[in-house]
Amino acid sequence: MKRVAIVTGAAKPDSIGAGVAKGLLDEGCNVVVADLYEQGFVPQYFCIRTDVSDPQSVESMIRKTAEKFSRIDILVNAVGGSWGITPQDLTAPPPRGFRGLTNCSLEDWRTILGANLDSAFYCCRAAAPLLKKQGGAIVNVASVAARKGIPPGAEGSSGPYAVAKAGVMGLTRQLALELGGFGVRVNCVAPGVIASGRLKKVLAFSGEKGPEGPLKQIPMGRVGTVAETAALIVALCSDDTSYMTGATVDINGASYAA
């Protein structure tokens, strides 16, 4: 029986989620794409318009998945962003300037935590009953920002984003404890600077300075690729990592060594 994998944020072009969805499809999974960006829906996936920051929308997506496939084996929470996740955010340039914890608006705080931390919580909680039936894997996507913070002045990112992604790491550890007895593994990937569509938009107005700082701060001397990051996530969904849970795996070219 084919495994069923849900990947959030996978309809956006040049995104980590899109790379993961393709990788899981290549591994023989039935792939559910949960996203607000309907323009990116393609027929090889079962696509469901979902606002992952809305618990009712998430529950509806899980229900439709269960009606279609009767099971969920994999959940990848790849959606996220430092300035929002709506279709308008996808087409608009990032907001200029740095929003720190002391100067962001309350709307900024709620929007960014909703897109990155609340969304992962809602999806994990809603999918857990189906995952527990036969075991499976959850992979959450955090960021190197959770490890070292965001320096003031960095364009295209924010203090709330760093806090939200740190929360994703804590969520991962706690869920690994709660779901381990049911054969459900929960891990996290923390990418550094990745050549995604988001990075390209930031570099369009900030030159060499990406959201995590100058490229010279990356010892490997280059940014990572979406394909490299997606391959790691797909591996964490496979039986090859069947005894690995509660871990956060860094992929950042040694820009931060945990």
Image (cartoon, rainbow, N blue to C red):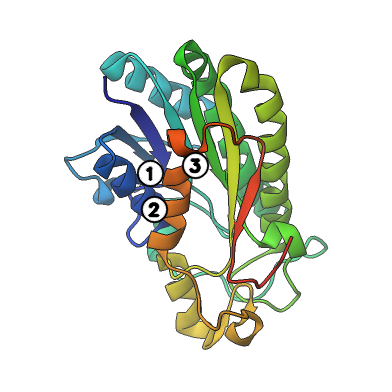
Q: Quadrant of residue 66?
A: top left
> Which one is earlier in the sequence, the residue at label 3 or at label 1?
1
- Label 2 sits on a secondary structure element that is helix
Question: Label 3 vs label 2: CA separation?
Answer: 29 Å
Instruction: Check the image and name the residue furthest to the left.
Output: 43
- Label 1 sits on a secondary structure element that is loop
Instruction: Kindly identify which numbered label has been placed on residue 236.
Output: 3
Q: Is residue 69 above or below residue 32?
A: above
Q: Is residue 77 above or below residue 178?
A: below
Residue linked to disc 2: 87
- Amino acid type indicated by mark 1: Leu
> Which one is earlier in the sequence, the residue at label 3 or at label 2?
2
Q: Are marks 3 and 1 in contact (CB under 8 Å)?
A: no
Q: Residues within 10 Å of mark 2 (few under 14, many from 20)?
A: some
Q: Quadrant of the C terminus?
A: bottom right
Q: Is residue 137 above or below residue 157?
A: above
Q: Are marks 3 and 2 in contact (CB under 8 Å)?
A: no
Q: Nearer the viewer, residue 50 or 71?
A: 71
Instruction: Check the image and name the residue furthest to the right.
Output: 102
- Amino acid type indicated by mark 2: Pro
Task: Indicate the position of residue 25 as horizontal and vertical percent values.
Answer: 27, 41
Question: Label 3 vs label 1: CA separation?
Answer: 25 Å
- Label 3 sits on a secondary structure element that is helix
Residue linked to disc 1: 36
Q: Quadrant of the N terminus?
A: top left
